[in-house]
Image (spheres, rainbow, N blue to C red):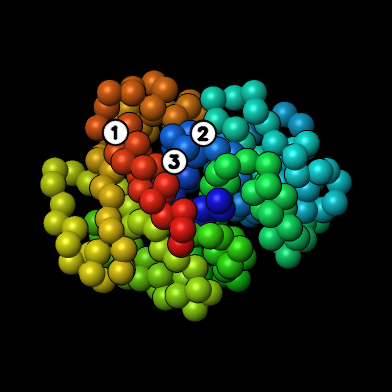
Amino acid sequence: MILTVTGGKGGVGKSTVAYNLGAALDGVVVDGDLAMADLPERRGPDLHDVLAGRADPLTAVDESGPVTLLPCGRTLAGARASDPTALADVLSRLDRAYRWVVVDSPAGLQADVGLPLSVADAAVLVTVPDRAALADALRVRALARELDTGLCRVVLNRVQGTARTADLADQFGAPVVTIPESGRLATAHEHGRPVGHTAPDSPAAEAFETLASAAYGCSSL
């Protein structure tokens, strides 16, 4: 199943959610942000190489780290050499090899956001409890509807205390999972590790397990 993690605004923790969700699902995470890659770098070929026709997708997947990952390069030259339209075929190849393919997509509403959404079986939309971020997330929700991509869950990230989610669920048309503000989560991500490995009993780790369980329920979308 291809599960695209998206968000309308940069800086809401989309990459952190994708990385930790992929770990909880024991799937492969694809760093699909061709211009602003944010997931750990690995040695060997990356998504830029794959989209430029220089590497096979399965060869570029690195299973040696704490999370199985298809990383993306950081260079402008690599991004320019890539053919974004080949992403659909790459994700389809991975989908045949792995039970779960979690795609960290670009933020915003530029054209390359629609590519991972259009090929996804379902999407997870990440936002924070901020008026501007929620407004941008609703725009991405509208794009997902246009592309006929089912919305599995909305993730309300960096929540302090309790959050009232019923109204958000009505607005977005999908249940909401909250991820608490967490220093442990931030530290784990800085070191390239999922919080479920470094702090398995933390509220953040439990939230990602809840999100992963929800993803199984969305497999029919």
Q: Secondary structure at mark 3?
A: helix
Q: Is residue 54 left or right of residue 138?
A: right
Mark number, residue 21: 3
Residue 125: quadrant of the picture: bottom left
Q: Secondary structure at mark 2?
A: loop
Residue 124 to residue 45: above or below: below
Residue 201 to residue 27: above or below: above
Residue 60 to residue 91: above or below: above
Disc 2 to disc 3, C-alpha distance: 8 Å
- The residue that mark 1 highlights is 206
- Residue shown at 30% from the left, 69% from the top: 173
Disc 1 to disc 2, C-alpha distance: 15 Å
- Residue shown at 33% from the left, 57% from the top: 154
Mark toward the start of the polypeptide (2 vs 3): 3
Mark toward the start of the polypeptide (1 vs 2): 2
Q: Is residue 70 left or right of residue 137?
A: right
Give x and y (percent) for residue 85: 73, 65
- The residue that mark 2 highlights is 26
Mark toward the start of the polypeptide (3 vs 1): 3
Give x and y (percent) for residue 109: 51, 70
- Residue shown at 22% from the left, 46% from the top: 159
Q: Secondary structure at mark 1?
A: helix
- Viewer can see residue 112: no
Mark number, residue 171: none
